[in-house]
Amino acid sequence: MCRAASLVFVLLLFSLLNLQLHPVAGVSYTPHAASEAARPSRVVELTDATFDSIVMDPEKDVFVLYYVPWSRHSKTAMKLWDDLSMSQSRTRNGLTFVAARIDGDKYPDVVSRMQVKGFPTMRYHTRLDKEEPLEYNGERFLSLLDSFVFQNT
């Protein structure tokens, strides 16, 4: 059994190396560091000028990630937010859900007005109650965030 697993591993490794050595014709590749690989995302980057028009839109459920770029926990949450935006766009066709984020260093006035005390902070502004967003304090797994959105929409 161990030999079979080793053979599968070698074949998989060879396949990956072969893809690297022989890229698909007509497709351009941009080398990335492993930690900076491009991720599919539909996250809306908020500013002080766009915050109210997007977050307070009565037609949208908006889940906002308040972050600071230098925080390790914020960086992890930003990757999770990319995944959440794609997951929700598949399950709800992106009709009413918006995954958004705002940089607390660039827009401290918004952070202060929204009374954010630490980073990252995750708040869900549903269509039903824009003034009292639901704060997510659970574990940071995509399945749990998806469930939170589903239960509160």
Image (tube, rainbow, N blue to C red):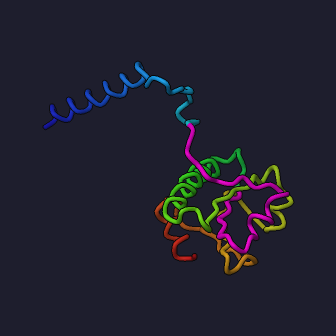
| Residue 9 location (% of width, % of height) | 26, 32
- Residue 44 colored magenta? yes
The picture places residue 138, in percent across and down from the top left corner, at 54, 67
What residue is shown at x 67% (from left), y 76% (from top)? 127
Q: Is residue 74 left or right of residue 84?
A: right
Looking at the rendered image, the quarter that the C terminus falls into is: bottom right
Quadrant of the rendered structure where residue 49 is?
bottom right
- Which residue appears farthest toward the top when viewing the image? 21
Part of the protein shown in magenta: 38-66
Compared with residue 123, is residue 32 higher up or lower down, i.e. above or below? above
The residue sitting at 56% across, 27% down in the picture is 30
Residue 93 picture quarter: bottom right
The residue shown at (58%, 51%) is 82
Residue at 67 percent of width and 66 percent of height: 62
Is residue 90 a member of the stretch shown in magenta? no
- 5 lies left or right of 96: left
User: Which one is nearer the viewer's eye here, 135 or 50?
Assistant: 50
